[in-house]
Image (tube, rainbow, N blue to C red):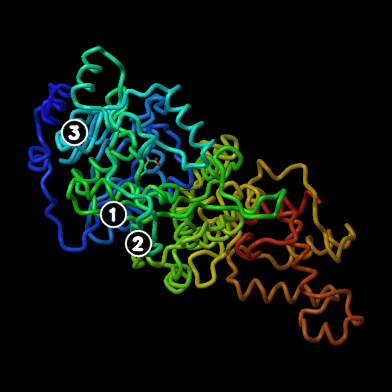
Amino acid sequence: MTNEQLADLIFPNITKTIEDYEKIYPKRDLKEGAIVTRYAPSPTGFVHIGALLASFTGSIFAKQTNGVFYLRIEDTDTKRTVENGISKIIDGLNEFGVTFDEGPINETETIGNYGPYIQSERKEIYQAFVKHLIKQGKAYPCFCSQEEINNIRKEQELNKARIGYYGNYAKCRNLSNDEVARRIKNNEPYIIRLRSNGDYNKKIICHDEIRGDIVFPENDLDIVINKADGLPTYHFAHLVDDYLMRTTHIIRSDEWISSLPLHYQLFQMFGFKVPKYAHIAPLAKIDEQTNGMRKLSKRKDPECAMSFYHELGIPYEAVRIYLATITSSGFEEWYLQNPCNKIEDYKFQFKKIGKSPALFDVEKLKNISRNYISRLKANDLYENISLYLKQYDKEFYEIFTKNKDYSTNILNIEREQKKPRKDIGCYKDVKNEIWYMYDELFIDLNYKWQKINDISEIKLILKNYIDNYYNESDDKDTWFNKMKQLTNNLGYCSDMKEYKLNPTKYKGSIADISMVLRVALTTKDMTPDLYEIMKILGKNKIIERFNKI
Ligand code: GLU
């Protein structure tokens, strides 16, 4: 029996050839240098920070080169599929600004001309490629049972040989076509393996865009390419899909680096141009117990799940800025100089992406978030906070949104200026920073009096101020001058230099007087600008608050 006949026996219904598929999925009409890349998750529905990093990186490179970024669902391992997994991935990434030009857009619809983008719907396409290999004698059916495979392994362990299905250990490699046909007709179960043409004692140089050239032994394993369920393994699907979808760059996590010699081999065995590869290092953290670096773990580390950022209320753009900061050298300096630019304005380069695991530090992320939030306009910030509170703090949401102008004014204190205020690191912080502005929450008070803490003196200062000095329509200079007059009239010193030289001549300074007002109005000893706070509270509220003391 010829190879051709064997191929027809195994795949009688596969009539299309590789050439047919090449016509259906022609070379993309894109400019020189355009990057076509993809994000290729299993439909587990779980978007984690590593997934965001990989997809964010891919989308940036595609966008910057006017290329294509597409989503491919790798569901050949049916055990990993969950209900609505595809939409969960799409929505989860979308929330963090990652969108696709092609691929599924929900559980049932797809856009793009290079589909299907769901691997389980591509069975026939893979089989056409497998059939092609069988015709050429470059693949063969393997009938080994799990038990036989285990025995091969035991033998290899005993001989201290490399583990795997290769060379003389590859039992089914040399079965005659007639023998194979007989066993297939006999309904013996089988899978299809690659007939590897690699020699483990020879070297192959593979290129990674981030790491440069890497030398490996050639692959001599006769890996499985088609499983018993008729679906391909990851390696074979990678070859077929990335070839037909005309991917130029495979951007994926570095757990796949060791598969490079095999992937080079697969493309070369078909005579296809090998795509470019860029392997992304994982995110890492300092382990609290050992103090050493370790990979972020989906199981152990809450910061792996995107829900972590939602619950804290860290703006998605801040997460993206942080990822760019820790993975791309040069980005942080650029961003400090161009804080108003978009991330996409930075020219990302593969060779500037880190080769080793990037340390992921939630505190640093919050700092980036703090800076980012400080640059938002009060109106936009109001909307973001409202959305956050609606989901996570209904009670404060009602209070915060009762009077939009009032809340926006609070957020606007020391904002939209050269050195804006940076008290909000994430939306979860907001209540803690501004609660005292709301009468509903101005209860059960714990005043943080400082130097002046005698209640009768405090009352005297407050009464004097409101009766003789406070005027709602005063501008800031007038307001401050009146504070000085109050200070002097009560025997305190309004000139800080003078006070430092002769502290004993006075009861205290203007700083002590304004602290009394600050604490009386907010209970806190540190707040944003007091003049602005008083303006927003208005005279009635000020009197009400003074009267509480
Ligand atoms: N489905 C593979 C994974 O989740 C994709 C790897 C790749 O991007 O090629 O690891």
Q: In which quarter of the image is residue 19?
A: top left
Q: x and y percent of residue 401 in the render? A: 51, 42
Q: Mark 2 points at which residue?
A: 209
| Three-letter amino acid code of the residue under disc 1 | His
Element carrying mark 1: strand
Residues packed near mark 1 inside 10 Å, few (<14), some (14 to 19) or many (20 plus): many
Residues packed near mark 3 inside 10 Å, few (<14), some (14 to 19) or many (20 plus): many
- The answer to whether residue 402 is visible is no
> What's the mark number on residue 134?
3
Choose mark 3 or mark 2, whichever is in front. Answer: 3
- The answer to whether residue 30 is visible is yes
- Which of the two labelled residues, at mark 1 and mark 3, occupies the earlier sequence position? 3
Q: x and y percent of residue 226 in the render? A: 28, 30
| Three-letter amino acid code of the residue under disc 3 | Ile
Q: x and y percent of residue 198 in the render? A: 30, 48
Instruction: From the viewer's side, name the closer residue of 263 and 439.
Output: 263
Q: Distance between the residues labelled 1 and 3?
A: 28 Å
Element carrying mark 2: loop
Position of 514 relative to 428 (above/below): below
Q: Pointer 1 and pointer 2: residues touching (CB < 8 Å)?
A: yes
Horizontal relation, residue 199 to residue 522: left or right = left
Position of 527 relative to 172 (above/below): below
Quarter of the image with the N terminus is top left
| Three-letter amino acid code of the residue under disc 2 | Glu
Q: x and y percent of residue 58 in the render? A: 34, 53
> What's the mark number on residue 249?
1
Instruction: From the viewer's side, name the closer residue of 528 and 177.
Output: 177
Q: Residue at x 22, y 55 (%)?
A: 67
Q: Which residue is drawn at 81% across and 86% down?
A: 498
